[in-house]
Image (spheres, grey):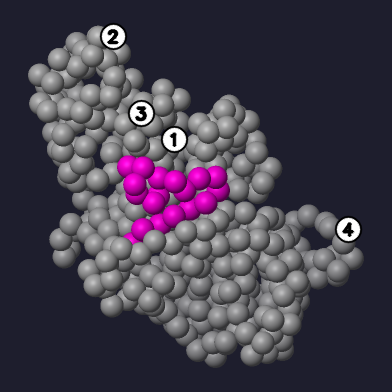
Amino acid sequence: MIYVAIMGFGVVGSGVYEVMKKNSSHIAVKSMQDLEIKYILDKREFDDPEIASKLVHDFEVIEKDPEVRIAVESIGGTGAAYEFTKRLLSAGKHVVTSNKELVAKHGYELLKIASSRGVNYMFEASVGGGIPIIRPMIQCLSANEIEEIYGIMNGTTNFILTKMFEDGLTFEKALEEAKALGYAEQNPADDVEGHDACRKICILSSLAFGRHIRPEQVRCEGILSVTPDDVRYAAQAGLAVKLLGRYVRISDGRICAYVAPHLVDKNDPVSSVNDVFNAIVVKGNAVGEVMFYGRGAGKLPTASAVVADVIDAARHIDKTKNVDLWDDSGDFVEDSRVLRGRYYVRAEGSLSRAREIFGEIKPISGEMGGECVFITGETDGFDFEEKLEKFLRNAQVFSTIRVLK
Ligand code: HSE
């Protein structure tokens, strides 16, 4: 018998409890032994007698109980979750988490502690909710040099974009629904301002590049600047608006990583990924492109990934796996403006003036003057900003969005 503790009984923690209970006999077969939840750590009280019988308010009960071999950290954030994870790993317990903020900020240190103590720190649920993406990056794609990763990595913002622009909901109403469905972060600004996607691209980039890439090294923009007009014009040009995280390997020692809204061609499979679904494309230099798709947030999809890690930890109870996933960080992240690409521009002004400044453009609207909407030719971000600056002298710019590819 292996005893497990769940720390934090919110959306994810209660989902883990539900899945472990519902699928217990199947999980025992996969784990090659019985698993039992011994403790649930939470500040609150619960009426359910079974949950109440396992409930503890004092972390030290878990830390000091030698019977607990695996702990699920579903507290979130980098306060108590960071402290407890360090202490549990140091005490020789395996820790499984969905906490992307903690992995993105302190993954290197926590992985080091885990390997020094002969245990595992596992985080399959930290990116893409229920989608298997961490294990494929560590194992199945390990023969490849990863050249690029891009994808929809935040379910809440994809849900909001879908509800606003396909179902006509207001931003506030769409966000309320995302919260009610358990998709949004405790602070939903983390979703809509792009910080959550930023943490996820940091984790994937660290796995791809083998060095810790930290959120503060990654340019991050959310969905707040995207307007219904932009979505309508984009659709006219056969493009969809998606919030993407992106990693590009520029050379052996340099990479770019950033989060921003993009216009995605309707022929790209990512463009038709809606609702809470995530889709992540990984390009390896041997395999070519692979795409991972599924529910990126929500109670049971996230619990599915967490419980898979619990099973894996149980199967490797006296072993370490996935040690040294990445090295410490350094100065190797380039400004994402070095990447070449096209840009969508919506401005008050004329297409003829736009042509004078940007050269060849693809007009979407505005042959008659007034508001003009166009897509530039391929350029890098610095050159684009310089030209935009010139254009701004005679025109008010309403929005600019990077076009993917
Ligand atoms: N708030 C996150 C999202 C939860 O919407 O994707 C899953 O990481």
Q: Are marks 4 and 3 in contact (CB under 8 Å)?
A: no
Q: Residue at x 22, y 59 (%)?
A: 249
Spatial CA span between label 1 and label 3: 20 Å
Q: Are marks 4 and 1 in contact (CB under 8 Å)?
A: no
Image coordinates for residue 234, horizontal then vertical, percent: 36, 31
Mark closest to the chain's N terminus, 1 or 2:
1
Mark 1 or mark 2: which is in front?
2
Kindly state the secondary structure of the residue where label 1 is placed.
Answer: loop
Residue on which the image places disc 1: 223
For ligand 1, tell me if the residue under mark 3 lies within 8 Å.
no
Spatial CA span between label 4 and label 3: 54 Å
Residue on which the image places disc 4: 47
Mark closest to the chain's N terminus, 4 or 3:
4
Kind of residue at disc 4: Asp
Mark closest to the chain's N terminus, 2 or 3:
3
Mark closest to the chain's N terminus, 1 or 3:
1
For ligand 1, tell me if the residue under mark 1 lies within 8 Å.
no
Residue on which the image places disc 3: 236
Kind of residue at disc 3: Gln
Magenta-highlighted residues: 265-282
Kind of residue at disc 1: Ile
Q: Are marks 1 and 2 in contact (CB under 8 Å)?
A: no
Spatial CA span between label 4 and label 1: 39 Å
Position of residue 382 relative to residue 219, above or below, is above
Q: Residue at x 27, y 66 (%)?
A: 288
Compare residues 351 and 157 and report the one nearer the observer. 351
Mark closest to the chain's N terminus, 4 or 1:
4
Spatial CA span between label 2 and label 3: 18 Å
Residue on which the image places disc 2: 370
